[in-house]
Image (cartoon, rainbow, N blue to C red):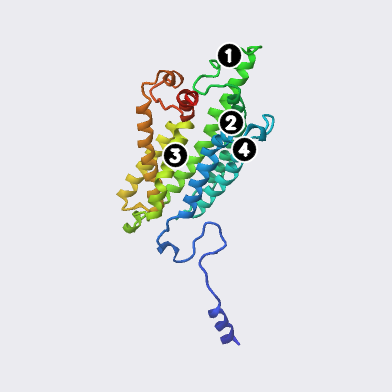
Amino acid sequence: MQAAVRKRQSNAPRSSTNPSQPGSKPEGSSMKRPQFHFDLWFYLTVQNWVLDFGRPIVMIILPLEWFPLNKPSAGDYFHMAYNVITPFLLLKLIERSPRALPRSAVYLSIITFVMGASIHLVGDSINHRLLLSGYQLHLSVRENPIIKDLKPATLIDSFELLYFYDEQLGHLMWYIPFFIILFLYFTGCFTHVKEEKTMPLSGWLLLGPSALYYWYLVTEGQIFQLFLLTFLAMVATVIHQRHKGSVPDANGLFLFVSFSVTMCLVAVWVAWLWSDPVLRKKYPGHLYVPEPWSYYTLHVKDSH
């Protein structure tokens, strides 16, 4: 009897970890070489270009009769889709991190991201209606022809508040958590396996579109300071990890090289428009980074 009990106990499966526990890794998973997440990087790049960059373009292309000014435009629906798809893809990216990341920071970042992007959705929607009425992006709110003569004058304060929510508060609440999430993910993308520092061909093919989008994000979103801090933090992380004998894996290298190319693109953009007197007036200071759509309304729109 006792021999039978001992036999059943010895045959019972033993597990040192609970596989259903969040953040736990299957035994032996630490020995697996991390794979390049081509699917997630591809989805992020495509939806960024289509839903974010393509948002103002689709509002220009589609007939105004299809979307009355008192109803959401096509660009608004693009923005709504972006506000849902992007945080979902960021969460999936965090799930694939080689190491466990601080959950509270991730959750708070995602919540703030959605809130900031939603604030921007409203402000940007109204801003598009103003553009159709003659609003000039390269001018300040009070200098715009359609606003400077409004009566009562307190209405101008309301439009400046709208600009604050759209271009300042909305952007900060949108982009700060976005870059926090990318940086947190980057900190987990290091390995002692030297072979993993090379990117596959698919990564190099995505590099150009990814870096070019980040250039648009940094310049149009007026977040160069935030991007610069994130990039410097990534550089410091790489240096620190190299002292420990670690190098970025394929995903970390893709993100780091994308940001490096973005820095070069921003530098070229600023150098090209360094002496533009009108844009210089709208974007004063030493950190002069003009917006692409301001350049469009100033130099391209009226030339056609």
In this picture, residue 220 sits left or right of residue 272: right
Would you name the residue on which mark 1 appears? Answer: 148
- Nearer-N-terminus badge (3/2): 2
Would you name the residue on which mark 2 appears? Answer: 124
- Nearer-N-terminus badge (1/3): 1
In this picture, residue 170 sits left or right of residue 193: right
Q: Quadrant of residue 228?
A: top left
Q: Residue at (52%, 69%) from the top-left corner?
A: 15
Q: Of 296 and 95, which appears nearest the observer?
A: 296
Q: Nearer the viewer, mark 3 or mark 4?
A: 4
Query: In the rendered picture of this protein, how many numbered marks are placed on residues?
Result: 4
Distance Cα–Cα, label 4 vs label 1: 29 Å
Q: Of 169 and 260, which appears nearest the observer?
A: 260
Distance Cα–Cα, label 2 vs label 4: 12 Å
- Nearer-N-terminus badge (3/4): 4
Would you name the residue on which mark 3 appears? Answer: 214
Contact flag, marks 2 and 4 (Cβ < 8 Å): no
Distance Cα–Cα, label 1 vs label 3: 34 Å
Q: Residue at (59%, 83%) from the top-left corner?
A: 5
Distance Cα–Cα, label 2 vs label 1: 20 Å
Label at residue 109? none
